Image (spheres, rainbow, N blue to C red):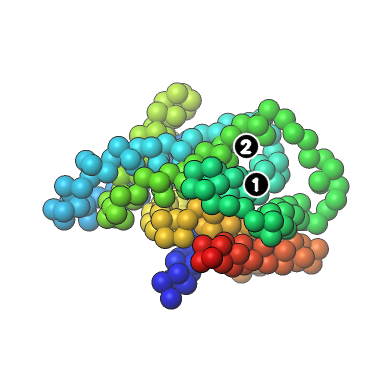
Amino acid sequence: MKSLKHHLFVLLATVLVAGSFLASEKLAGVINSFSLTLLRFSGAALLLLPFILLNKSKRSAVLRTLPRAAVISFFYAAYFIGFFQSLTLTTSLNTGTIFTLLPFITALLSLVIFREKITSSQLVAYLLGIIGTCWVILGGQQGLLNSFAFNQGDLIFLASVIFMCLFSISMKLLYRNDDMTVLVFCTLICGSLWMALALAYSGQDLDWNLIQGDAVFNMAYLIIAARLVTSYLYQTTTIALGPKRVNAYVYLNPALVAALLFMLDNIQIPIQVLPGIALSTLATLYLQYDINKQKLS
């Protein structure tokens, strides 16, 4: 039952992240991406601050947690920095396709760091997951796949994906039975510092005053649901289930985005992407089963 609870947690986090794509799209062009991410980190940290300050044990745990949180948040901030940089040199189609490698690269790193073996059946599941998510991203159109060309921006984003894998692995590796609220708070604080440095280096302005009207509600979603809540859920589930099992849910992202577009904006899901959704779902479910079986054996 405890394992089921954590799977439900990571599934909820995956849905919330899918929603962040919709909210981020509506905020695109309002302020620059570095400033947007800094506001997400710092806003979420500010919301947690009272819970830390009003609790003596949590307050006293902050200083000893900060050094490890700085490492964890560095990998996450590095992912976003590389992601934004890559989009100046490549397309969202290319980055979406490359992102499907996240679970497999995580499995390779887990093999090296945690000695978690990759079975032949898991390799097949990773391949099916990649095919399924690419199918959804490409809309089932062979022509789009033919237009894919690897470039310098793709190499930058591939490095970013590795940083995202290291983010998940570092959470598992550096966890010391911490109070999860404190760990999330420290990660958000350190992440804000990393993003502030990136923003200063980029030379772009904050422009937070430009967030007005409906943009305020989309920003609130990104801060509360897509940053604060998902930080807690992902860090809790990664510690409990391990990076391989958590990152396997990435294959569901394109399908969940399509489902949310249908439910919220009444945008129909093209029939040709349904086989890709089915493949992604099957790959995710089988990976959970096979990794769990491997742990029990």
Work out whether 243 lies above or below 67: below
- Residue at image x 48%, y 48%? 114
What is the x, y in percent for residue 254?
A: 65, 57
- Can residue 169 be seen here? yes
Nearest to the observer: residue 35 or residue 92: 92
Kind of residue sitting beneath label 2 = Leu
Q: Quadrant of residue 87?
A: top right
Looking at the image, residue 198 sits to the left or right of residue 288; the answer is left
- Can residue 292 be seen here? no
Quadrant where the C terminus is found in the figure = bottom right
Residue highlighted by disc 1: 101
Q: Residue furthest left?
A: 56
Nearest to the observer: residue 275 or residue 286: 286
Residue 42: assigned label: none
Looking at the image, residue 283 sits to the left or right of residue 139; the answer is left
Name which of mark 1 and mark 2 comes first in the sequence.
1
Q: Secondary structure at mark 2?
A: helix
Residue 158: assigned label: 2
- Residue at image x 29%, y 54%? 177
What is the x, y in percent for residue 265?
A: 62, 64
Quadrant where the N terminus is found in the figure = bottom left
Kind of residue sitting beneath label 1 = Leu
Contact check, label 1 and label 2, Cβ < 8 Å: yes
- Label 2 Cα neighbours within 10 Å, binned few <14 / some 14-19 / many ≥20: many
Q: Secondary structure at mark 1?
A: loop
